Amino acid sequence: MEKILIIEDEKNIILPLKMFLLKLGYDVKIATDGIEGIRIAQEIIPNIILLDIILPKMNGYLVCKALKDESETKNIPIIFMSAKTQEKDIKKAYDVGGEDYIIKPFIHKDIEKILNKYLKED
């Protein structure tokens, strides 16, 4: 079963997203701040990470950079999820190692498409 780590602090996003992913058959873990996100990622080595930018304790850019700097987590695809729509914010997400960027609010089909893109490489 593929593991997805969601690093997000907004409950109104976490709960429906988690339920949706569980229904699709994924093993879902949640971190609500950047530091916890790094710890869980290093612990479980998820198949993919869905990462918010604005987080308590450590922002998503720093989380992504930290994970990409570690040999055991550097190959995990990191998908940014953010309400930030400015070109500079999106560019920065890719610059620190993000594989993709989803603008909030998103629909679950968008998430499913991204997961199929990064996880269905049999």
Image (spheres, helix red, strand yellow):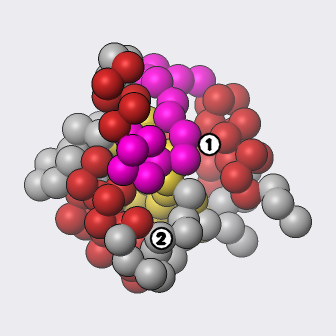
Count residues near mark 1 (Cα–Cα under 10 Å), then give few for <14, some for 14-19, many for 20+.
some
Looking at the rendering, which quadrant does residue 85 occupy?
top left
**19 relative to 66, above or below:** above
Residue extending farthest to the left is 57
Query: Which residue is painted at 36% across and 50% down in the image?
Result: 96
- Is residue 95 on the magenta stretch? yes
CA separation, marks 2 and 1? 26 Å
Label ID, residue 1: none
Q: Position of residue 86 (x, y in %)?
A: 34, 17
Q: Secondary structure at mark 1?
A: helix
Three-letter amino acid code at disc 1?
Phe
In the rendered image, the quadrant that contains the N terminus is bottom right
Residue type indicated by callout 2: Lys
Q: Give how far across and how far down residue 41 sits, in percent.
A: 41, 71
Q: Is residue 34 a member of the stretch shown in magenta?
A: no
Residue position marked by numbered label 1 in the rendering: 20
The residue sitting at 21% across, 48% down in the picture is: 59
Quick one: which residue is furthest to the top in this view?
Answer: 86
Q: Which residues are magenta?
A: 93-107
Camera sees residue 43? yes
Left or right of 21 on screen, residue 50: left
**What residue sits 40% from the left and 66% below the top?**
68
Q: Is residue 1 left or right of residue 74?
A: right
Which numbered circle lies on residue 74?
A: 2
x, y percent for residue 45:
50, 76
**Label 2: which secondary element:** loop
* x and y, in percent, of residue 108 in the image: 62, 31
Q: Residue at x 38, y 20 (%)?
A: 87
Picture quarter with the C terminus: bottom right
The answer to whether residue 16 shows anywhere in this view is no
Crowding at mark 2 (Cα within 10 Å: few <14, some 14-19, many 20+): some
